[in-house]
Amino acid sequence: MTLPRLRTTALALAAALAGAALPAAPPTAAAAQALEQAPPTPPGGVATFDESLSISWVLVPVVVRSRRGHVEGLEKRDFQLWVDGRETPIQELDLGSEVPLSVVYLQDLSGSMANSGKLEASRRAFSELLSAVGDGDQVALATFAGDRLRVEVPFTNEVRTLREAMALWEGYGTTALHDAVSLLPDISEEGRSGRRVAVLVTDGVDNSSALEPEEAVRIVRQARLPVYVLGLTSAGHGTSSQAAASEVLYSELLQDLAERTGGRYFEVTDEEGASTSVASLVSDLRHRYVLAVTTDGDAPQRSHEIRVEVRLPYRHTLTFRKGYSGGPPVSAGNR
């Protein structure tokens, strides 16, 4: 497909995800799968909210890490969540590890990727990911170069087919990175699993996009799609000072994309780094908590900022979605 300025299907998907009216029964892990993918058939149960109020759910995946690794065994009471600076009740907590993954793997095949061992590192990263595919997981492989993005392999669990497509990678053409990123929601829509996630592998140097980076991030964030980024650099390969400065600039943009969507950014300089980064990425996806918050489905749709904290007596780090598009949280007076 030709990289567009804006895909209406991406916006339609985002609107559906953000505004689906649901009854107030807390979502279980199975329900969370359906909620993240598309507006589900309402589950049974007695509504506990005013019947005149349309209720939507916002799901916030959270990864908690300490020096010893991922923190497990936390309960709802251990978390605090704020929306637009105001503490908001968490209705339910589930372990995301109970739901299979639908992973969109978006590979940069532009001309700059043919240099400094970047394609070799990319293949190592993809091989590592495929080795970690579990029962029920799906992977879709898409590539971009010049003004085109191709879905080389639609969602599948056939690892052999994905490896055969990987063997054909060659670097060519210009880089329309921001345009390609804006299409991630379109591709992920085809995934069966509710735990949709994107992995972007690129050296970050955009030289032909129609979209500004902020617009690409907005589209992906509105679709509630976490993006994990492997940012390939030329460290140790005699990079010119001008090229190095460009890589620093784009690494900051890629970090912003990952952090604002609830993913992580990994700087990769060689094949070994690619392997360890993907292992860490997969571990994140297998150890996510999912916080559910109720919102007013009838209110005007707008952007809201999210902040999450966890009560722990030792140092730790959190990864979580930084916002959502939709109605405000339901206040206690609406219950």
Image (cartoon, helix red, strand yellow):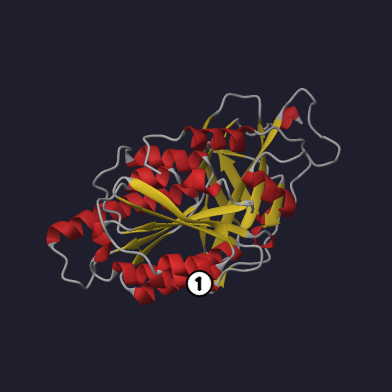
Check disc 1 and report the residue beneath it. Answer: 67
Image: 29 above or below 66: above
Residue drawn at 25 percent across, 50 percent down: 174
- Is residue 66 visible to the viewer in this orientation of the structure? no
The quarter of the image holding the N terminus is top left
Residue drawn at 73 percent across, 25 percent down: 53
Residue drawn at 49 percent across, 65 percent down: 162
Mark 1 burial class by Cα count in 10 Å: few <14, some 14-19, many 20+ = few
Residue 324, image x and y in percent? Answer: 54, 39
In the foreground, 263 or 84: 263
| Residue 266 in which image quadrant | bottom left
Image: 35 above or below 168: above
Residue drawn at 34 percent across, 67 percent down: 268
- Is residue 297 visible to the viewer in this orientation of the structure? yes
Which residue type does callout 1 highlight?
Answer: Arg
Residue 74, image x and y in percent? Answer: 67, 62
Residue 306, image x and y in percent? Answer: 53, 42
| Residue 136 in which image quadrant | bottom right
Extreme-bottom residue of the structure: 272
Taking 125 as reference, is 194 left or right? right
Taking 182 as reference, is 304 left or right? right
In the foreground, 209 or 204: 209
Image: 117 above or below 17: below
The mark tally for this picture is 1
Which SS class for mark 1?
Answer: loop
Residue 288, image x and y in percent? Answer: 60, 60
The quarter of the image holding the C terminus is top right
Image: 26 above or below 290: above
